[in-house]
Amino acid sequence: MEREGPPLSRHPSGGVLTIQTHRFSFFVAVALIAGAIISLQIIAMRLYAISGWAHFGSTVISVAMFGFGLSSTLLCLGKKWLEFRMELLARIGWLLFGPLSVLGNVVAQEAQFNPIFLLTDNHQIVNLFINFLAYATPFLAGSLLLGIAFFAGRHRFEATYAADMLGSGVAGLVCLSVMLWVPPDYLLVVPILFWWAGAMAWFHAWGDKRFSGWVSLSGIITIVLLVWLPQIQVSPYKGVSYVTKFPDANRLYQATGTHGLLEIYASSYFHFAPGLSDMASLSMGELPKNTYLGLFMDSDGPVGIMKPIPSDKQDYFRFLPMFMPYLINPQPENLFVVQFGGGISTRVALAGGAHHITVAEGNPMIQTALASETMRSFTGDLFTHPRISLVPMDGHLFIRNTDQKFDVIDLSLPDSSGLSSPGGFAVTEKYLYTHETVTAYINALKPGGILAVTVWNKEDPPKSTLRLLSTLASVGRTVAGEQVTDSFYVVQVFLSTVTVLYKKGGFLPEEIARLDRHAKEMAFDVVYRPGERFQGNASLLLAGVRQNVLGVAPTDQNEGDAQLPGVDDGEDFSMAAVYRLLLDRMIRGEHPEDLAAYPFDIARLTDDRPYFSGFIRLKDIPAFANRLETISDEWGYLLLWLTLGQSVLAGCILISLPLIFAWKTIFAPQPGKLGIFGYFFSLGLGYILVEVSLIGKFISALGNQVISTSVLITGMLISTGLGSLVAGRFLARSQTVMPLIFSSIAALLVLYGTQLGVWLPAIGTLSWRIVACILLIFPLAFLMGFPFATGMSWLARLGKEHFFLWAWGINGMFSVMSAVLVPLISVSVGLSANLYLAAALYLMAWPCFFALLRPSPST
C-alpha cells in the first residue's frame, strides 16, 4: 500500500537526494527499466542471430554494456553537478531509451559485419565500430536511469537492487515466452513495453504526471519506427541469401519459435548428395531429380530434406558414404539415428533394410514443420512410417539415459556446413561429439554393432574433423583396449565428407575386404583400415604441413593433386597422407610428439570443452599474424582476444578517471580504497563467469543457446534478487554472516563444476527440465545475491557516496570483461574452470569486505 506524500526529497534546484517514502511504484519502475535492458539484450541477440551470427551479437552487446561503466563514471565525476540535475537526466533517459533501441538495431542491421572479410574489406572494421555504437547508445541511456535509481534508493539499496534483479529475471522469462508467437521483426516490442510501463511508474513515483505524456508520445514514435523500418536485414553471406537469388526459389514453410526462425525452400538448384561418389552418374545414368528441399535455421544452412526416391532409383543410396555400415550389417534389427536433421540418414537406413529405426530430434520446430500438410506431401510423412519411432529430445541425451542396445548407431551430417562455420559461430557448444557422448554411443551398441559417423569436411588442411577423430580414437582406446586397431575403418571424399566406422569387437578380414572393394568401386579414399600402419616419413610430412600453413612460398604443383608445397615429389604429401599419419598415432596412442607437431590443436572434445574452435595454440599466434587468410574459420575466436583487449583498455580508463580527477578531494582521505576495488572487481568478474559458463553447460540439457540463455537469466536473476532482498535483514550481522556466504558460494561452485556433467544429461530427458534447471541453480544464485547488495548498502550507510557510484561502475565494467573472458577460458581450459575461478574470486572478496567496512573520517 502506498503512503501519501512526496516519494523523494528534492533539492530546491530539482535534484534527487534520497528516498523518504518508499513508494511501491518506484521499485516497479526500477524492475521495469532493468527488464527493458535485459530484454533488449536478449532480443538484439535473437535478431543478430538471424541477420548475422549469434556469437558476434553477444560479443557486440557485451562490449556495448560498457554503458554501465561510462554512466557510473559520469555520475561519480560530476556527482555534485549532476545531483541537482538528476531529474532532468532521468527525463532525457526515459525519453530516448525506446527510440534509441529501435534505431540502434536498424543501424546495426544496415552495417553488416562479416569477420571473414576483415583483411580484404576495410569497411568491416567500420561496420564493427558502428555496431558497437549502435547498441551502446540505448544501453547508455538505460544504465544512466539505473544509476540514478540506485543512487536515489541507496539507503534501501537491497530492495532497489532486488527490484533490478527480479525485473531482469522476469523479463528473461517473458522473452522466452514471446518468441513462441511473435514474429522476429516485432520482438523489440518487448523491451519497448517494459520501457514505457517503467516510465509511467517512475513519473508516478516522482509525482510528475505531466512528463508521462511526453514519454507516451515517444512511445508512439518508437512503435511507428518499429513497424516502418526493417528490423532484420539478412547478411548477403548467409545461406538463405544465396538461395533467394535462385530464379526458381520458393519458400514453402516458415515458422518462428525459441529455437529460431525456421524456413524451408524448394529449388532445382539444391544438390546436396553429401559425399556422393563420382561413380554414381556413370553407373546410374540419370540421377534422381529435385530430390531435396533446403531447411534453414536463423538463415543458416541449408540442411537437406530428402524426399522418397523412386523404386527404380534406389541404387542411389549405395553411392552415399552413409550406406557403408549396411555392407557389414545388412537389414539391422534395431538402429538409432542420433539426429534427424533433414532425414537423409533416415532415408539411407530405410534403404539399408533396417527393421526398426529410432530417430532423435530435439528441435520441436523441425518435427512440427515436417508434420505439416505442405511437408507431408513432399517427405511422405516420414515420422509416421511404421518402421520409425521418434524420440523428441537430443540424441546425446537419449543415448546416455537408455537401456536399449542397437545394431547400428548413425550420426550423419547434423551440421549444415561442417563442424565449424567460417566467420560464424566462433564458440558453439556441440555435445553430440564429446568423449562422454561417444562413450555412451559405443556402450549402447550390441556386440558386433557399428557406430557410423559422417561429417562434412571442407577444410584444407583439416582441423575440426581431426578433433572429432581424436575424440573417437580416445574413446576407442578406452573401450576396446588393444583391439582398437581392428575397430576403425575411415574413408574421405576430398573436400566433401569423412566417414568413420567403429565396430564393437573389431572388423573381420572378410568385412575389411568387402569395405575395400566398395571403397574402390566408389572411388572413396581409404585413410585408415584395421591394422594398417603409416608407411611414410612422418617428420617430413608434418614439416610440409607446417610450411604450407605458416607460409613458405609454394612450389609449382597441380591444384588437383592436393599436394603440400615445398617438398620432394617422391613422398605423398596429400591430405589423405595427413589423415593416415595422424589416425595411426591417434588410434594407437603412440608418438604424441607427432600430434603436437601438427600446426593446430586437435585435442579431443569433452563435455567440459565441447568446442570445434580454438585450434590455434597461443604460442603459434605470432606465426599466424601474416597468414590470417589461411585460418578464416578461426577469426571469430581470435576476435575474442581483440575484444577482450579493447574491453580491458576501456574499463581501465573509465575506472581510473574518477581516481585521476578526484584523487585528492575525494579518494585520498578515504580508507579501504583497495579493498573496495578488490571487492567489486571480484563480484563483477565472478558473477558473469558463473552466469555465462552455466549457460554453456546447461545447453547440454536444454538443447538450445537461446533457451539456455533465457532460462539461466531468468533463474539466476530472480534468485539473486530474492537473495539481495533477504540480505537486508542481515546487514547488522553482516560481519558474521558474510564469511559464511562467501565460503558457501565457493563450495557450491566447486560442486557444480564437478557434478553438473552428471546431473544435466539426466535432467535433459525430463518434460519439466526448464523448471528443474531453475531449481538447480537457485541455491547458488540466491546466495550470490548477498554480496553486492550488502557491499553497496554499507557504502551508503558509511556515507561513501562517491565510492557507491564508483563501485557500481567497477562491477559493471568487469562484468563486460568477464562476458568476453568466459568463452576464451572455456575453449582453452574448460567450462568448469570458469566456476573454479569464480569460487576463488568470491573467496578473495571475503577479506576485501572487511576493508570496505572501514568508516569514512567524516562518518
Image (cartoon, grey):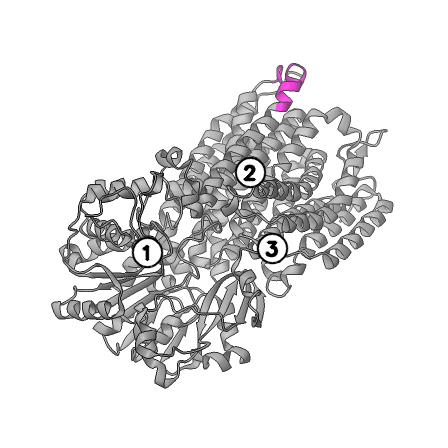
Nearest to viewer (mark 1 / mark 3): 1
Q: CA distance from mark 1 to mark 2?
A: 48 Å
Q: CA distance from mark 3 to mark 2?
A: 21 Å
The disc at residue 766 is: none
Q: CA distance from mark 1 to mark 3?
A: 41 Å
Q: Secondary structure at mark 3?
A: helix
Q: Residues within 10 Å of mark 2 (few under 14, many from 20)?
A: many
Residue placed furthest toward the right: 210
Query: At label 3, which amino acid type do we have?
Result: Leu
Residue at 56% x, 70% y is 249
Image marks 1 and 2: residues in contact by CB distance under 8 Å: no
Residue placed furthest toward the bottom: 311
Q: Which quadrant of the view contains residue 89?
A: top right
Relative placement, left or right, of 413 versus 70 is left
Residue 749 placement (x, y as % from top left): 42, 42
Residue that carries the numbered disc 1 in the rendered image: 560
Residue 691 placement (x, y as % from top left): 50, 45
Nearest to viewer (mark 3 / mark 2): 3
Q: Which of 77 and 55 lies nearest the eye of the viewer?
A: 55
Q: Of label 1 and label 3, which has the lower sequence position?
A: 3
Report if residue 618 lies within the magenta region. no
Q: Residues within 10 Å of mark 1 (few under 14, many from 20)?
A: few
Image marks 3 and 2: residues in contact by CB distance under 8 Å: no
Residue at 47% x, 32% y is 739
Query: At label 2, which amino acid type do we have?
Result: Val
Residue that carries the numbered disc 3 in the rendered image: 47
Q: Secondary structure at mark 1?
A: helix
Q: Of label 1 and label 2, which has the lower sequence position?
A: 1
Q: Which residues are magenta?
A: 657-670
The disc at residue 816 is: 2
